[in-house]
Image (tube, rainbow, N blue to C red):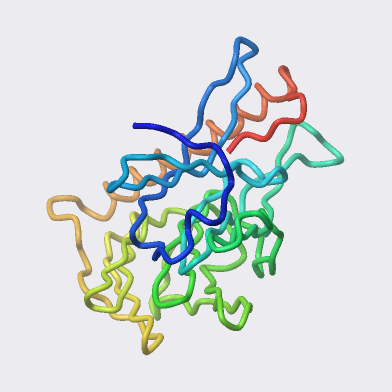
């Protein structure tokens, strides 16, 4: 498969974004151990790869999503100015117009709340963001046409967002499936009518609530421990200005 690293916007003229497969690929460059990130557009017809660099200020642990003619990089973490060994969640959002690549990335309207490791889905011109770590908000939705973020109403029953499973888009039914580790409950959010429905109280058969809760506690501990290890490594081996994803 051949690659073209040029940022020629003419490649996308007259083409629908859905005709392309997009992927974020992390590559090790040179012998200095530095990492770079590129947004890869894979054309299955011509068997070519077109690469667009990531935003220079994109924070680590952010999430990329495509919606319509745009690609967005959302959330992440950055260094704490008072304590470089610690990290803070950010609400930054970067946008790339696939029809105007020469313009490059631009910073657009920020989210309502800072979020790291956000779960992101796109449907019908809107971007839905769910938090997989502790946050002040269960989730929020971005209306691309109006360029506005709004809070996403939580399910009617209490749900522990710190142990939220990865949401899944069920486009054929205009809904988003959300599973909570702690209770084992499976919810459906119908985005056309902005309402929640509980589909299954015990979605994982054979697992009691206590066992499920134990598993999610272990998972949360592993995630927190991993973040501490990353902070320690970055404090011992500070970067030279390059951003990791």
Q: Is residue 105 visible?
A: no
**Residue at screen point 48% across, 63% down:** 13
Whether 12 is drawn above or below 223: the answer is below
Query: What is the residue that sits farthest to the left in this orientation?
Result: 206
| 240 left or right of 134 in image | right
Residue for point 52% across, 74% down: 141
Q: Which residue of the protein is positioned furthest toward the bottom in this rendering? A: 193
Instruction: Report x, y in % for residue 139.
Output: 52, 69
Between 133 and 189, the residue placed more toward the observer is 189
Q: How far across and how far down the image is residue 166, in percent?
A: 37, 55
- Tell me if residue 135 can be seen: yes
The x and y percentages for residue 57 are: 72, 45
Q: How many circles with numbers are drawn on the protein?
A: 0
Depth check, front residue: 5 or 114: 5
Q: Quadrant of residue 104?
A: bottom right
Q: Position of residue 243 (x, y in %)?
A: 67, 35
Residue at point 68% right, 57% down?
Answer: 103
Residue 168 vs residue 207, the one in the foreground: 168
Instruction: Indicate the quadrant containing the C terminus: top left, top right, bottom left or bottom right.
Output: top right
Residue at the image point whose x is 70% and y is 43% from the top: 56
Which of the image's four quarters has the N terminus? top left
Q: Residue furthest top?
A: 31
The vertical placement of 25 against 65, above or below, is above
Image side of residue 193 versus residue 55, left or right: left
């Amino acid at each position: 498969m051949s690659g073209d690293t040029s940022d020629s916007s003419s490649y996308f003229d007259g083409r629908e974004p859905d005709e392309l497969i997009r992927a974020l690929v992390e590559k090790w460059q040179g012998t200095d151990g530095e990492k770079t990130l590129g947004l890869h557009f894979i054309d299955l017809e011509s068997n070519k790869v077109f690469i667009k660099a990531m935003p220079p200020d994109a924070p680590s642990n952010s999430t990329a999503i495509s919606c319509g003619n745009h690609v967005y990089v959302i959330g992440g973490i950055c260094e704490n100015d008072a304590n470089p060994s610690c990290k803070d969640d950010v609400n930054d959002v970067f946008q790339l117009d696939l029809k105007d690549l020469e313009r490059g990335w631009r910073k657009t309207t920020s989210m309502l709340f800072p979020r790291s490791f956000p779960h992101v889905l796109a449907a019908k011109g809107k971007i839905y963001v769910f938090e997989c770590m502790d946050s002040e908000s269960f989730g929020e939705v971005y209306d691309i046409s109006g360029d506005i973020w709004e809070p996403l109403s939580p399910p009617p029953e209490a749900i522990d967002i710190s142990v939220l499973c990865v949401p899944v888009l069920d486009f054929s039914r205009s809904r988003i499936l959300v599973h909570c580790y702690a209770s084992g409950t499976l919810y459906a959010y119908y985005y056309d009518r902005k309402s929640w429905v509980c589909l299954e109280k015990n979605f994982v058969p054979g697992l009691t609530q206590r066992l499920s809760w134990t598993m999610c506690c272990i998972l949360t501990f592993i995630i927190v421990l991993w973040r501490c290890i990353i902070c320690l490594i970055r404090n011992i081996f500070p970067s030279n200005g390059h951003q990791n994803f």
